[in-house]
Image (cartoon, rainbow, N blue to C red):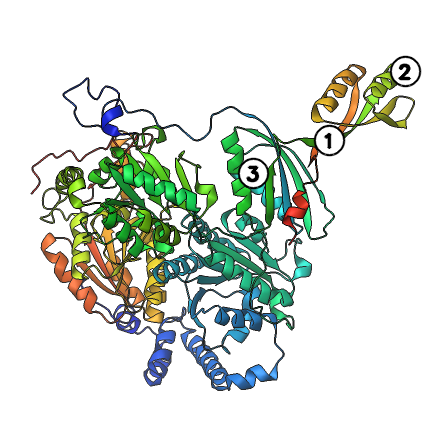
Amino acid sequence: MGTTDDGPGRTPTATSGQTRGPAPGAGTAGAGMAQASSAERRRIDHTPGAGSPSAEAISAGRREMLTDTRRLQIKSLAERRAKRPRIGADAVCEALIRQGVEVFFGYPGGVVLPFYDVLGDYPELRHILVRHEQGGAHAAEGYARATGRVGVCLATSGPGATNLVTGIGNAMLDSIPIVAITGNVVGSLLGKDAFQEIDITGITLPCTKHNYLVRDPDDIPRVFAEAFHIARTGRPGPVHIDLTKDALMGACLAEHPDSVDLPGFKPTFEGHPRQIKLAAQEIAKAERPVILAGHGVLIADATEELRELAEKAQIPVAHTLLGISAMDETNPLSLGFVGMHGWKHANKAIQSSDLLIALGMRFDDRVTGHVPTFAPYARIIHVDIDPAEIGKNVAVEIPIVGDVKRVLRALIPQVEAVAPERRAAYLAEIAGWRAESEKTPWHGSGAWRNGQLSADFVVSRIGEATGHDATLVADVGQNQMWTARYGGFRRPNSHISSGGLGTMGYGLPAAMGAAVGRPDKETWAIVGDGGLQMTVQELMTLVQEHIPLRIALLNNHKLGMVRQWQELVYAGNYHSSHLLGPNWCKLAEAYGVAAFRADQPGQVDAAIASARAVDGPALIEFCIAEEQNVFPMMPAGKGLSDLLEEQFEEPNQ
Amino acid sequence: MSPTGSTPGGSADPAHPAPVHTAPPARALPGNGQTHRHVLVTIVLNKPGVLNRVASLMRARNFNIETLAVSHTDQPEVSRMTITLRGDDVAVEQAAKQLYRLIDVLKVQDVTSEPTVEHEIALIKVRADDRNRGEVLTIADMYKAKVVDLATESLIVEATGTEAEVDALIALLRGFGIKELVRSGTVVMSRGAGSIEEAVKR
């Protein structure tokens, strides 16, 4: 294990002092810096003109601004609020506070400045200034997934708004409750191609659960109450609110409603008793049942009910990617995750099952593979709160529309208790498969080929070092599959991943949001070098907000999953899958993030321990084997029984 | 279905005693693939953008709308859409369920197999002069269509009826030369005392 030549830089000042050095003409500014407070020094260090002949003038200007800011802060907040009429922006802040929002992620710009003008008057609201709006949207998602609460992000009109769209789409596909707020141009300019105007409600219409364009400040209280209700009720999802600048600035007299009136939004929570009775009968008849637990189990907070059902009827539990952590993986009935890169024993269990109990999942093609080959002997019970998911991808025998927790509570008393002996042969068969499948692609020595560091080992060591209690947030690609397979998840919602949309760049900002939402839990981002380069700017947010996130960078200098497909499907035609990256430790230190590096199996534990000891964010660059693939793998268009396995060229060490 | 008992070839091949891996039956995909015309009546909140939401959803979910008629109802806060589309029963049920996911959609009803009154209106501008105007008028009369505009070279026929009736009239008039054609799209109403509009009243 080692750090870079400069040693770990813990603060921006430490690093910039070493790398930049005094420049001619900067002497006076430097003297000013010495007297300034540490916060001020940090700002001045980042003055773009530092080192240039005009540095002194720029620094002097900065100090002026800082003083002004402080002067504003000193003013009594109550005094400020009393002196002015209540405007739309105040109603937004009040609504956020009423909805229990404590922290949100935003980026200012022209049309949302009225909001930022009053935001300082609401100390209950913590605003985290992200470095890119996409980071804000993903952070809101990470926050929502780690806490189960509604995440909030905010951006200005035009480019700010469009930058949120990837995150909104991700929240739609993964059923994450977020409220995305954007500004728009003054109502009278709508449709006139005004500066930074874009039809953002038209853009988000197909990728939100619902969206609003608000032009009247008096609509703000109602719209926010509805938006939060829609976002978190039933199947969660993103709601977008677009506020014109005059809606934010205009006087607002409307009161906040205590309830919402949405005649077109009435989710079904209770499962139909007849269907539940049928489900209990199916379970009683089944000899080889398997539960397939999805994200809905975690959303409905039904992890205890899941365990109860599984143990009462002795049914093994497989997880979808987003259903990971719905059951403690050390429970003997937990099979781990299924699908394209899932555990072979879990896939085999599904393929040989005679009854599949699908809870809060949607038969994604990454889970089913080629549908005609999926679970060919199984009758299917499908529980989901969204009626549109029933029969969408797979025809099912017993559909139950309802909240997983309430359906399970009604179902469990009707299910016959099964003695473990009755399932002994079945469970022993799966255990045999498991012993084989856990052994095959695993590199327990930490080395893949020729002693090169193995990614599965790194992920597993992070899980061990954190006592399997940390929240592990993956990016997308190989790192995501290794995290899902080897993290070893025991606590509900300790695994966060971009499932449906597969958003590279998700890992770092989502982990930032998760860390902010759960300060009581350790949070790790496990990312690849491709994804990290997409949203690396949020390192600065971590430093500014002092968020103690640990980032495990699995660096193979590749778009690993692309390379894997090119190797296995496209005959080794490696076009555009090799990518250069920066000197990661120097980059991290330039941001003020402590950085460590490990390229040998023996250095992994020490690097993890060093990162965990840092007060504030830390990054470890794990230089992993460049050509290691994730196995098993279900080729596209094939089924769960057609898994590719690793072909060893030399004995596994 | 028991995997041990009903596996095709399972007992015939002693080398594979396990229930799996021996010519498993193919899992059926949802739907029977028999497409035919469906009529959906949809009651929506009368809010800006609701037509866009419905149209966008149908496009994004790969459903092909044949006709779409939107209008007010007797209640100012709701509008009514009549959508005709082709698909098998499961696909159209899926379209209805997806429509229900829209917050502004209150009620969706597939009235295809119900007794309904189904009508559309068409305006057909036909080439007609002194030589053949009489023939056009006769055909229009037989379809209980009205002539609503008369000029030296053309006339406009206004026809109402089911889609099939209007299709038949258009086919007959095509021989004279249709200069312009507009159809409103089908509107339907269930026969009897039942009311979809009352069903959504609060």
Report if the CB atoms under discs 1 and 3 are less than 8 Å apart.
no
**A607 or B39: nearer the eye?**
B39
- Say left or right for A459 vs B59: left
- Distance from Cα at disc 1 to Cα at disc 3: 23 Å
Asked if A226 appears above or below A165 in the picture, the reply is below
In percent of width and height, residue A251 lies at 65, 73
Judged by depth in the image, the label closer to the viewer, 1 or 2, is 1
Q: Quadrant of the C terminus of chain A?
A: top left
Give left or right: position of B119 versus A564.
right
Which residue matches tag 2? Answer: B134
Amino acid found under the numbered disc labelled 1: His
> Is any part of residue A649 visible from this angle?
yes
Which secondary structure, mark 3?
helix
- The chain carrying label 1 is B
Label 3 marks a residue whose chain is: B
Q: Chain of mark 2?
A: B
Which residue is at 29% across, 65% downward?
A: A590
User: Along the polypeptide, which appears first: circle 1 or circle 2?
Assistant: 1
- Tag 1 residue: B119
Above or below for B6 versus A72 = above
- Say whether disc 1 or disc 3 marks the residue closer to the N-terminus: 3
Same subunit, labels 2 and 3: the answer reads yes
Question: Percent x, y for residue A596?
Answer: 19, 61
Report the label total.
Answer: 3
Give the label on residue B58, or none: 3
Residue type highlighted by circle 3: Met
